[in-house]
Amino acid sequence: MTVLYWILLSTFVGAVLSVSAAAAIAYRASRAGVSRLISYAVGTLLGAAFLEILPHAVETAKSIQQLSATVLGGILLFFMLEKFVLWRHCHVESCEAHDPRTERGDADPGDHGRTGLMILVGDTFHNFVDGILIAAAFMTDIELGIITTIAIIAHEIPQEVGDFVILLHSGFSRGRALAFNLLSSVATLGGGLLAYFALQSLQNLVPPLLGLAAASMIYIAVADLIPGLHKRPEIGATAEQVTLIGIGVGTIVLVGFVVSGFFADSH
């Protein structure tokens, strides 16, 4: 298969799979189930960033110092975007996403969908960037592209679950919440296509984009997901979280081993 075909397949399947799985979980799962997904996502994000993306970026980068600066700058950039509610969604104390009543399911959706629309705008931007990162990874190496796609899907599912919950409490019906999320996910495909055709003539941009991909995964895991895990400090909960994080890392290692073996046999 061509690189373009891999990008199209991965962005489409990744977008539809993450939204569909998130919808199924949001409609049925308990809070404990979502927490387990988050722990697993932390492992896949950190495993993909440190074991796959950064090593490939180092191999293709002309300057390790510039690549390191890109990763550092990316982390700071995502911090600023989060502050302006562009990269992540609604981290202020008054937000209904953090209202204990919303978490119990009895909040009054009195914002007439404003919070839900804000989340959809942020998700569209996020999905567009994910498409760019997937394309950059595939243009470096097919194996890296597959692993990057899996990591993005793994962290998208728990995030989308939270988005679905907020949309429902913002006044969206289940059907509208699913439809709007699927529409927003199309941005992943757009980002992948744009990156493929733009990066064809700008191959020197691939290493910094991989650096940004690693920075985004590290930031999401460390700044957004791990703090939520600290809300359960009990020994049993901690052991479960560490185990699931380890399984997430192990998934990346296993996928890398299987995919590399498959391509080695095909050659």
Image (cartoon, grey):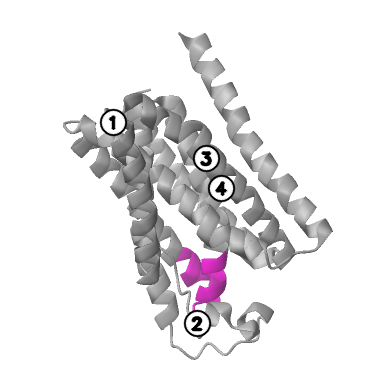
**Residue type, label 1:** Ser
**Circle 2 is placed at which residue position?**
95
Asked if the residues shown at circle 3 and circle 4 are in contact, with their CB atoms under 8 angstroms apart, the answer is yes
Kind of element beneath mark 2: loop
Of residues 245 and 7, the one drawn nearer to the viewer in this rendering: 245
Determine whether, in the image, residue 221 is placed left or right of residue 28. Answer: left
Q: Earlier in the sequence, mark 4 or mark 2?
A: 2
**Circle 3 is placed at which residue position?**
150
Question: Nearer the viewer's eye, disc 2 or disc 1?
Answer: 1
**Dominant SS type (magenta):** helix
Residue sitting at x 32%, y 36%: 65
Asked if the residues shown at circle 3 and circle 1 are in contact, with their CB atoms under 8 angstroms apart, the answer is no
Of residues 35 and 131, the one drawn nearer to the viewer in this rendering: 35
**Circle 1 is placed at which residue position?**
63
3 to 173, vertically: above or below: above
Alpha carbons under labels 3 and 2: distance apart: 30 Å
**Circle 4 is placed at which residue position?**
154
